[in-house]
Image: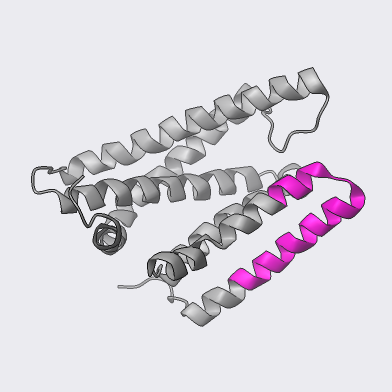
């Protein structure tokens, strides 16, 4: 049973265009106001929002409209948070971490499942996928926190404003908790819905033996 209505490709494009316009406005504001953080975060997010369309044109790899919105919404909400909502809405950081972690979990699962489907010699038990998704997300979370820590050191050394920053041990632990929540959602509910995507990845990209 489908719990949520599935958006059409047309509706997905409209929503994506709306988010892209907001990001363009954010970059424009950064240029006018001399805010490098807004320029960096908005510019990177804007590029990522074009990824689903680029995959469709370059590799004939159409993403399900929900998946396209999943990618776009993840970077869009993070950029809005960096623009000020992280400080104004206490739960915004939790939301973006859970959403981003679920996206990382989906990418990790899809890649591993595509390899599993492609190679007869490789068989990955379903129960292992549950553990694998958690390992991928937690490992990525550790790398991300180390990256933020490195940016903090660079900011202190150079006096420059960095697009990301750490906010103490409590914040790091809370981030890990909501990363785990995003992984759990995908591990429990996402595998069935992502199997078709894994099959498409296998057909498009694994045409020869690795």
Q: Quadrant of the C terminus?
A: top left
Residue 10: x and y in percent read 52, 81
**Residue 76 seen anywhere in this rendered image of the structure:** no
- Residue 58 magenta-drawn? no
Q: Quadrant of the N terminus?
A: bottom left
**Numbered range of the magenta stretch:** 16-42
For the point 63% across and 43% down, which residue is it? 93
Side of 31 where 136 appears, left or right: left
Residue 202 figure quarter: bottom left
For the point 41% across and 38% down, which residue is it? 137
- Residue 35 magenta-drawn? yes
Up the image or down, 76 lies above or below 88; here it is below
Residue 32: x and y in percent read 90, 54
Side of 77 where 37 appears, left or right: right
Secondary structure predominantly adopted by residues drawn in magenta: helix
Name, please, the residue furthest toward the right. Answer: 33
Residue 39: x and y in percent read 77, 49
**Residue 71 seen anywhere in this rendered image of the structure:** yes
For the point 49% across and 60% down, which residue is it? 70
For the point 14% across and 48% down, which residue is it? 119
């Amino acid at each position: 049973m489908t719990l949520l209505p599935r958006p059409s490709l047309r509706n997905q494009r409209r929503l994506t265009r709306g988010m892209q316009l907001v990001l363009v406005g954010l970059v424009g504001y950064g240029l006018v106001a001399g805010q490098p953080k807004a320029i960096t975060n908005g510019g990177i997010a804007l590029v990522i929002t074009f990824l689903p369309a680029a995959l469709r044109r370059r590799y004939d790899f159409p993403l399900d409209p929900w998946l396209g919105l999943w990618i776009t919404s993840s970077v869009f909400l993070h950029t809005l948070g960096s623009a000020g909502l992280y400080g104004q809405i206490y739960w915004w950081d939790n939301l973006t971490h859970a959403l981003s972690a679920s996206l990382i979990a989906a990418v990790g699962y899809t890649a591993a499942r595509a390899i599993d489907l492609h190679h007869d010699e490789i068989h990955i038990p379903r129960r292992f996928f549950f553990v694998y998704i958690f390992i991928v997300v937690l490992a990525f979370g550790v790398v991300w926190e180390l990256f933020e820590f490195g940016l903090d050191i660079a900011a202190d050394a150079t006096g420059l404003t960095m697009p990301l920053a750490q906010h103490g041990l409590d914040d790091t632990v809370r981030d890990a908790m909501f990363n785990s929540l995003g992984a759990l959602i995908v591990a429990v509910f996402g595998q069935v819905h992502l199997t078709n995507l894994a099959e498409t990845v296998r057909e498009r990209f694994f045409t020869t033996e690795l």
